[in-house]
Amino acid sequence: MKPVFGVVADDLTGGLETAAMLIAAGIDCAFVTDPDLVANVGDVPAIVVAQKTRVIPADDAVARIEKAAQALLARGARQLFFKYCATFDSTDRGNIGPVADMLMQLTGADYTAFCPASPSLHRTVYNGHLFLGTELISDSPKRNDPLTPMTDPDLVRVLQRQTSTRVGLLAHPLICAGLAHLERAIASATGQGIRYFITDAIYERDLDVLAALTSDWKLMTGNATIVQHYPAIWRAQGLIPATGNRVGLPAVDGGGVVLAGSCAERTLEQLADFEKCRPVLRMNLLAVDDVESAVGSALDWARPRLEAGPVAISTSESPEVVKLVQERHGRKGAAELAETILGRLALSLRDAGVRRFVVAGGETSGAIVDHLDIRSLRVGPYGGPGIGTAATDGADPIALCLKSGKLGPVDLFMTTLKSMQNPENAN
Ligand SMILES: Nc1ncnc2c1ncn2[C@@H]1O[C@H](COP(=O)(O)OP(=O)(O)O)[C@@H](O)[C@H]1O
Ligand SMILES: O=C(O)[C@@H](O)C(=O)COP(=O)(O)O
């Protein structure tokens, strides 16, 4: 079977969430982090290749995603979908624009669209401007993101800074006017050299229209939310079987930990909630002299406490402290420091018997999955916006929940760690 849908995701949380959404819609979906594994995944209608490419240098991101895209096309993928964040996380140097430029060339697409909106999460795009609830993204807490602060809400302008391909807009009245109007507008705009279209979307029904418009395109890009609107179209077109094989995840016992590197407000709230019942180690990066001793002290703290139940270890801080850490180590250096500490901790904790991991943050998830050398995952049922659950295959599986920093219910950490276990052993 040739895959109907091949996804290249720019981080692990978003990629896993996309796969989980497809599985929830009855689409068998393979999930790998290594493009070399694409050739070997079984006969499935959808494949997600998720890599930690959101904030690496644009050339590297292009090369790594190109490899994944080539592997998906070699499997005969009918459409490629480039998955990035609903908040359009990127810097002026990329990587959304440069990756899209490469994917256009590779797929031979004449044009594509950019649809980050997630109306049910109040992430909407109107007149090309991205809103979080009633606030422009640039007035929201996203302005303080440690890696991709969003200071410009105009996505046409943001994307145009990243590419020489001309960027236009499919504005809301046009989306309300329906497919025929949209197709005419695109034909006219491409005649004027515009090849990229930021799409307005305020309501779920706008995504229905955009999914219908783009379901046959060689290349589409956006957040995971629009992906939920494709399976009904594929079924109506007879491209996939009416039902898929939904396989659950194995129950996993062994120790449980939360590792949090996300500094998003929601993650800080989730840590505070977890701390009501179990201990949290908040690591102070300003006091870290060397990684080895920081990891060693954190392990000494965790080991005895793990006997009584799960623990959380975080480097998460308020924007004020993040600023101080970045002043000392640079933006990239601070991220690398936090990611290396949490990644090494994950490895040592696994060796110490931990089998259930909840990870907060997309970049953090990428670092931890890399350190654990996990390259493919069996994906579990959709756990809600921003949340993906999965397990490794084999006799001694590791259960993972990868959570987008900004999302998830406040009590997610404890409830998820419990839900991973055999109910008889839950603590
Ligand atoms: N105390 C800290 N100071 C500076 N940067 C940090 C700190 N703790 C974590 N980070 C970095 O901030 C980034 C958070 O990004 P990410 O993990 O993707 O979370 P989110 O999903 O909230 O964006 C990571 O690269 C992480 O290593
Ligand atoms: O679109 C989203 O919000 C997520 O799918 C996502 O990509 C989140 O990124 P992180 O907040 O960095 O995990």
Image (cartoon, rainbow, N blue to C red):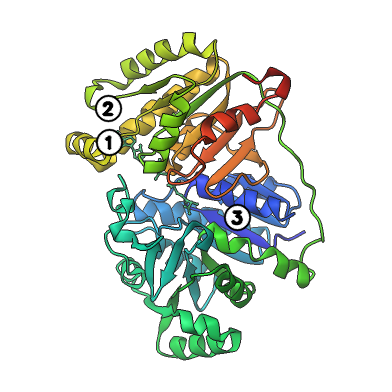
Q: Is mark 1 within 8 Å of ligand 1?
A: yes
Q: Is mark 2 within 8 Å of ligand 1?
A: yes
| Residue 220, picture quadrant | bottom right
In the rendered structure, which disc, 1 or 3, sits on the residue that comes first in sequence?
Answer: 3
Residue 71 image label: 3
The image shows residue 212 at horizontal and vertical percentages of 63, 75
Say if mark 3 contacts mark 2, CB within 8 Å: no
Residue that badge 2 annotates: 285
- The amino acid sitting under disc 2 is Leu
Left-right relation of 113 to 331: right
Q: Secondary structure at mark 3?
A: helix
The relative height of residue 123 versus residue 172 in the rendered view (above or below) is: above
- Which residue corresponds to the image point at 74% horizontal and 48% vertical from the top-left? 42
The circle drawn on residue 78 is none
Q: Nearer the viewer, residue 45 or 264?
A: 264
Q: Position of residue 411 (x, y in %)?
A: 52, 35
| Quarter of the image with the C terminus in it | top right
Disc 3 residue type?
Answer: Ala
Bin the neighbour count of mark 3 within 10 Å (Cα to Cα): few under 14, some 14-19, many 20 and up. some
- Calculate the distance from the C-alpha at mark 2 to the C-alpha at mark 1: 8 Å
In the picture shown, does residue 260 fall above or below 151? above
Q: Nearer the viewer, residue 108 or 411?
A: 411
